[in-house]
Amino acid sequence: MAVLTVLIVASGIIFMIGNHYQMTEKRVEIPTEKAKLSAVITFPKQKKIKGIIVFVHGDGPQNATQDGGYKPVMERFAKSGFLSVSWDKAGIGSSTGNWLDQSMDDRAKEVSQVIAWLKTAYPKEAKQVG
């Protein structure tokens, strides 16, 4: 069983390191009312952008790409013509603040503030936000 687990983990690592994703990534800082969020924005390499997909983490201390786990999904969106954005939760990675101090209302406000920032930074692309 241990050998199988090691093989699965090793295969995942090789896939993540060896994969040249078909998207362009940009690290940005998004100011919100209570924190500065370190975010990853992914863009299609060649397609016209149809809209923006916003990733919102569930519970736990998550970084922008969930240690690379979101990248295949971000790539799929990019290949379909969508810009996507995800951020390190408050207090994780380069984001300031502390996600443990946030209520659900705080988290909802944070998402609204990220969307407002996107509408200013990418007004043409932000006509469709999901």
Image: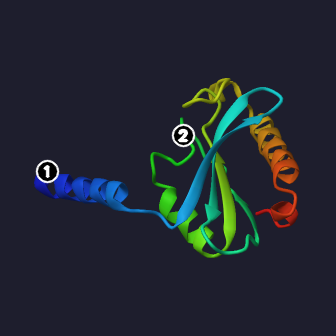
Structure colour scheme = rainbow
Q: Are marks 1 and 2 in contact (CB under 8 Å)?
A: no
| Label tally | 2
**Residue 105: percent from left, percent from top:** 81, 38
Residue type for callout 2: Gln
**Picture residue at 38% right of the left edge, 62% below the top:** 19
Q: Quadrant of the C terminus?
A: bottom right
Q: Is residue 102 visible?
A: yes
Q: Secondary structure at mark 2?
A: loop
Q: Earlier in the sequence, mark 1 or mark 2?
A: 1
**Residue 23: percent from left, percent from top:** 55, 63
Task: Tell me the number on the disc at residue 62.
Answer: 2
Residue carrying label 1: 2
Q: Is residue 42 left or right of residue 108?
A: left
Local crowd size for mark 2, using a 10 Å CA cut-off: few (<14), some (14–19), many (≥20): some
Q: Is residue 8 left or right of residue 22?
A: left
**Residue 80: percent from left, percent from top:** 63, 76
**Residue 117: percent from left, percent from top:** 83, 45
Distance between the alpha carbons at the discs numbered 1 and 2:
27 Å
Front residue of 46/117: it is 46
Residue type for callout 1: Ala
Q: Is residue 57 visible?
A: no
